[in-house]
């Protein structure tokens, strides 16, 4: 039932050809100048840097073989900052962050001529990972995501960890940060305006056009929208493979339905006082689960 409802809602919006990545690219546009990026850093950290030359942009285009692109990365003081924007919920951001930081640290070592085989300890900048989230899923003002949450088994300290701080930048959240960084507040306003108009209009193109006009009139990202209106429109309206997206949703719906069926079976078996060892064997036989997945379903 959950799958049918979820897929049905997607069908309602098929007429709107949305590129779910557009907000991520627009985020880079909004903060591509050092002045705005420095203001954002100050707002997040409660600092008062004023000299843009204190900031060095180190954004990388691709990471290893995955073809991922990060949004913004920069050095300031002792910090190596990675700022990412997310419009959809992604629990794998810490893993992405690990790959990003590995590449950035390698670049830092090479650029500064550091020798990792030296007998002396190399001094490295402190990784700081911030995710700016304004998707539709409910989230607190501030939360943490950790790489260790994805480990198959976790007892004690692992050799690796990556901690991402997620900041909700939807309307009504993180007011202190939004008040201190007008650019971030304006960005969030524009995204919400596009979202609101998309509900009312027949096409996303019309929705974006109305959002642009409203924001220019209210002096919200007006410098970008006036000068780069066509670019912004193109970024938002980049073609999106709806068929592929719907196939992904369909697959995810089947997987969710399968897990619900497994949980229901476990519940019924336990009500009948069937030992977990026997239930586990039944799960492995009926659903083709391995030992680890069968144990996970028993623990849920």
Image: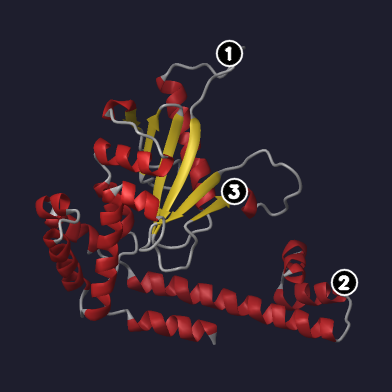
Q: Which quadrant is the C terminus positioned in?
A: bottom right
Foreground label between 2 and 3: 3
Q: Which quadrant is the N terminus positioned in?
A: bottom right
Answer whether labels 2 and 3 touch (C-beta < 8 Å). Answer: no
Foreground label between 1 and 3: 3
Q: Label 3: how many residues lie within 10 Å, few (<14), some (14-19) or many (20+)?
A: some
Disc 3: which residue: 147
Residue 115 visible here: yes
* Dot placed on the residue nearer the N-terminal end, 1 or 2: 1
- Distance of label 2 from label 3 (alpha carbons): 31 Å
| Residue displayed at 76% across by 48% down | 155
279 left or right, relative to 117: right
Disc 1: which residue: 118
* Dot placed on the residue nearer the N-terminal end, 2 or 3: 3
Q: In what element is the residue under mark 2? A: helix
Disc 2: which residue: 277
């Amino acid at each position: 039932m959950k799958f049918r409802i979820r897929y049905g809602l997607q069908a309602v919006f098929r007429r709107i050809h949305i590129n779910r990545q557009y907000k991520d690219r627009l985020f880079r546009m909004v903060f591509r100048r050092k002045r705005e990026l420095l203001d954002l850093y100050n707002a997040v950290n409660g600092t008062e840097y004023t000299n843009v030359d204190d900031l060095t942009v180190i954004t990388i285009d691709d990471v290893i073989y995955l073809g991922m692109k990060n949004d913004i990365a920069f050095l300031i003081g002792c910090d190596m900052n990675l700022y990412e924007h997310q419009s959809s919920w992604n629990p794998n951001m810490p893993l992405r962050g690990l790959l990003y930081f590995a590449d950035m640290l390698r670049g830092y070592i090479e650029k500064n001529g550091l020798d990792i085989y030296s007998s002396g300890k190399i001094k490295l900048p402190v990784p700081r990972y911030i995710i700016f989230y304004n998707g539709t899923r409910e989230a607190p003002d501030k939360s943490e995501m950790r790489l260790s949450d994805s480990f198959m088994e976790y007892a004690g300290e692992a050799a690796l960890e990556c901690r991402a701080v997620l900041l909700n930048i939807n309307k009504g959240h993180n007011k202190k940060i939004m008040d201190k960084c007008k650019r971030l507040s304006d960005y969030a306003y524009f995204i919400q305006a596009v979202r609101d108009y998309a509900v009312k209009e027949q096409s996303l193109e019309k929705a974006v056009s109305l959002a642009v006009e409203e924001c220019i009139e209210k002096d919200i990202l007006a410098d970008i929208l006036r000068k780069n209106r066509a670019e912004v429109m193109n970024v938002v309206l980049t073609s999106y493979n709806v068929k592929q997206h719907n196939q992904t949703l369909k697959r995810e719906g089947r997987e969710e339905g399968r897990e619900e069926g497994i949980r229901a079976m476990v519940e019924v078996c336990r009500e009948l006082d069937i030992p977990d060892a026997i239930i586990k064997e039944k799960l492995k036989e009926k659903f083709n689960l391995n030992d680890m997945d069968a144990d996970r379903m028993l623990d849920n």
